[in-house]
Image (tube, rainbow, N blue to C red):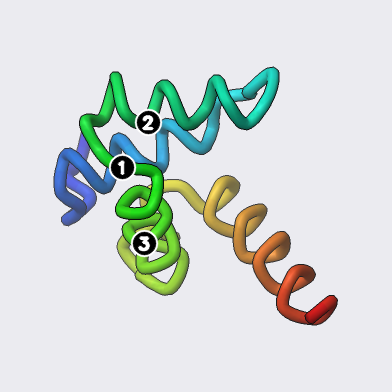
Amino acid sequence: MEPSGLSEREEAVLAHERRGWPGPGAKERAIREELDLSPTRYYQILNALLDDARALAHDPVTVNRLRRRRDAQRRRR
């Protein structure tokens, strides 16, 4: 596999977002246990990745899905 230019942590955050979650509690618990991040830091990294061309090239389906969701939330505000 060709290197994406992303750090291991950034790739792990994107992989985490590809997973399905039964509820918010399970996701936050997995963020802490599997990635050793606070949910706040996780979402900071994730939001930065949504604007990163390397992340788009690495996982276009996930990044585009999350961008659409973020844009929809911004329009509702």
Nearer to us of marks 1 and 3 is 1
Residue 23 x, y percent position in the rendering: 68, 24
- Residue drawn at 26 percent across, 47 percent down: 10
Q: Secondary structure at mark 3?
A: helix
Labels 2 & 1 near each other (Cβ < 8 A): yes
Q: Which residue is mark 3?
A: 44
The amino acid sitting under disc 2 is Ile
Where, by quadrant of the figure, is residue 57 drawn? bottom left
- Residue drawn at 78 percent across, 81 percent down: 77
From this view, report whether residue 55 is shown above or below residue 25: below
Mark 2 or 1, nearer chain start: 2
Nearer to us of marks 2 and 1 is 1
Q: Secondary structure at mark 2?
A: helix
Res 38 label: 1
Q: Quadrant of the N terminus?
A: top left
Q: Residues within 10 Å of mark 1 (few under 14, many from 20)?
A: some
From this view, report whether residue 38 is shown above or below residue 72: above
The amino acid sitting under disc 3 is Gln
The amino acid sitting under disc 1 is Ser
Q: Spatial distance from mark 2 to mark 1, Cα to Cα? A: 7 Å
Residue 17 x, y percent position in the rendering: 51, 37
Where, by quadrant of the figure, is residue 21 drawn? top right
Q: Residues within 10 Å of mark 3 (few under 14, many from 20)?
A: few
From this view, report whether residue 17 is shown above or below residue 72: above
Mark 3 or 2, nearer chain start: 2
* Image-based side of 44 in relation to 6, left or right: right
Q: Residue furthest right?
A: 76
Q: Which residue is mark 2?
A: 31
Mark 1 or 3, nearer chain start: 1
Residue 50 x, y percent position in the rendering: 46, 65
Q: Secondary structure at mark 1?
A: loop
